[in-house]
Image: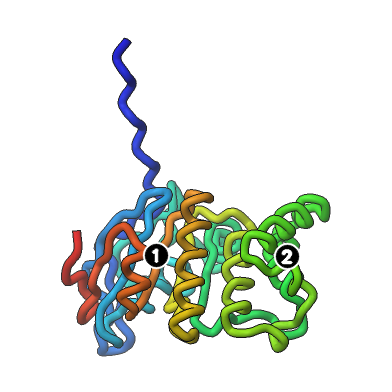
Amino acid sequence: MPSLPAIPPATVLTVAGVGKSYGEQRVLSDVSFTLRAGERLALTGPSGGGKTTLLNCIGGVDQPDEGTIRLGEVELTRLSSDGLAAVRRRQIGTIFQFFHLLPTLSAYENIELPLQLLGVGEPERAARVGELVRRVGLTHRSAALPSQLSGGEQQRVAIARALVHRPALLLADEPTGNLDSANGAKILALLRELTDESGVALVLVTHSEEAATLCHRRLSVRDGRIAGGP
């Protein structure tokens, strides 16, 4: 019996002809690419080239002036601010260079917060948070406040928080930029493991060659345009 053809992964993200200006300054011009489930994409290039602006547009934090951005079947560029907030809460996880943990919440509570905002019941919250705390190696530190954690530990909390609601898309802006090389390598290994396991699509902004090699492919953003990459 002939084998059936493999079903390709679904397209999670479609960026088509995106442009953005701030006043007279052109920041993005005609940016287009797609991203499939389970795929990791690095956005590289010089500072000021438009990488973070592009990431903000993809995440619905900013709106492009032209072009379209689709997350699955949802066109983000047509949504209201409330609609964008709802999509971010349910479908997008974000990891920042400086962690952005709430200082008065414990590691466990920081990870749990996205599920509370979505109204997930306590038993399901406990199961999901407990599993991720274990996976990021912080079971013994789950009651600690961010100020009591090292930089590497804080970033592991941030990764768990970004994944706990099981998003379709994970955005990471220089996730190792505030860490030493040893902790940076551990964070990259953890990102590889967790994205492989979950099948989440990842867009990673980085200046780090080590971080870029985590990804299946890369695009160089220079002067607001895609300058290279498959």
Q: Which residue is mark 2?
A: 112
Does residue 14 appear to the left or right of 183 in the view shown? left
Q: Position of residue 109 (x, y in %)?
A: 76, 71
Residue 169 tag number: none
Quadrant for the N terminus in the image: top left
Give above or below for 62 relative to 47.
Answer: above
Residue 160: x and y in percent read 62, 65
Q: Amino acid at mark 1?
A: Val
| Relative vertical location of residue 186 with respect to residue 33 in this rendering, above or below | below
* For residue 26, above or below residue 197: below
x, y (%) of residue 2? 29, 14
The scheme the figure's colours follow is rainbow
- The numbered disc on residue 203 is 1
Q: Where residue 64 sits: x, y (%)? A: 35, 71
Residue drawn at (40%, 72%), measured in percent from left and top? 55
Which corner quadrant holds the C terminus? bottom left
Q: Secondary structure at mark 1?
A: strand
